[in-house]
Amino acid sequence: VKRWACAHGLYSNVLGFLGGVNWAILVAWVCKRNISSPPSILLKIFFQTFSRWRWPNPVLLTPILKHPPPGVMPLNVWDAANPRDRAHLMPIITPAYPSMNSSYNVGQSQLRRLREELINGDRIMNQIFDGKVEWT
């Protein structure tokens, strides 16, 4: 996924796209739900899932912890009820306390481009699995 994102110019937090942590959380979300699937199927599921994802619904690996573990200072956590957090376009939430949106800098044009590329990736994966094109 990292190689694909780099090749398509989508691997850059600085430019408002997704970086390593963001892509890793998305991949982990797919792997966590399909633990016995081989890599080729996981990749297909990845594109199928995130090309259809209803943003701004957040991607969560674990439930959001509102309160810190013992011995940890209370910190602000991402909360969809908070108007500032609710304004985020593509929330990908970190799994450890404090839960934060790791993709807060994604803008409207970047989200549009990410969606287009994920849809195209899904189309290509379907063609590969239908035997119309080969892996390259």
Image (spheres, grey):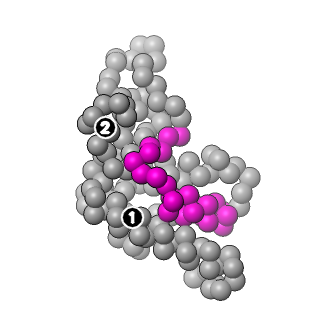
Along the line of sight, the residue nearer the viewer: 10 or 124: 124
Q: Nearer the viewer, residue 77 or 48?
A: 48
Nearer the N terminus, badge 1 or badge 2?
Answer: 2
Q: Is residue 117 above or below residue 29?
A: below
Question: The residue tagged with tag 2: helix, strand or loop?
Answer: helix
Q: Position of residue 11 (x, y in %)?
A: 37, 63
Q: Is residue 3 visible?
A: no
Q: Is residue 114 magenta?
A: no
Disc 1 to disc 2: CB gap under 8 Å:
no
Check the image and report above or below for 77 versus 3: above
Give coordinates of residue 78: x percent, y percent.
36, 33
Secondary structure type for disc 1 = helix
Considering every residue shown, the one lying at the far top of the view is 70
As drawn, 46 above or below 81: below
Left or right of 98? Residue 123 is right
Q: In the current view of this chain or complex, which residue is farthest to the right?
A: 36
Mark carried by residue 33: none
**Start-end of magenta stretch:** 39-61
The amino acid pointed to by label 1 is Leu
State the image coordinates of residue 136 (x, y, percent, origin top left). 57, 82
Determine if residue 54 is in view. Answer: yes
Is 129 above or below relative to 81?
Answer: below
**For the residue marked with disc 2, what is the amino acid?**
Asp
Residue at horizontal 48%, vertical 74%? 120
Q: Is residue 44 left or right of residue 3?
A: right
Residue assigned mark 1: 114
Look at 34% across and 18% down and name the residue there.
74
Q: Which residue is mark 2?
A: 85
Image position of 3 (left or right of 16) = right
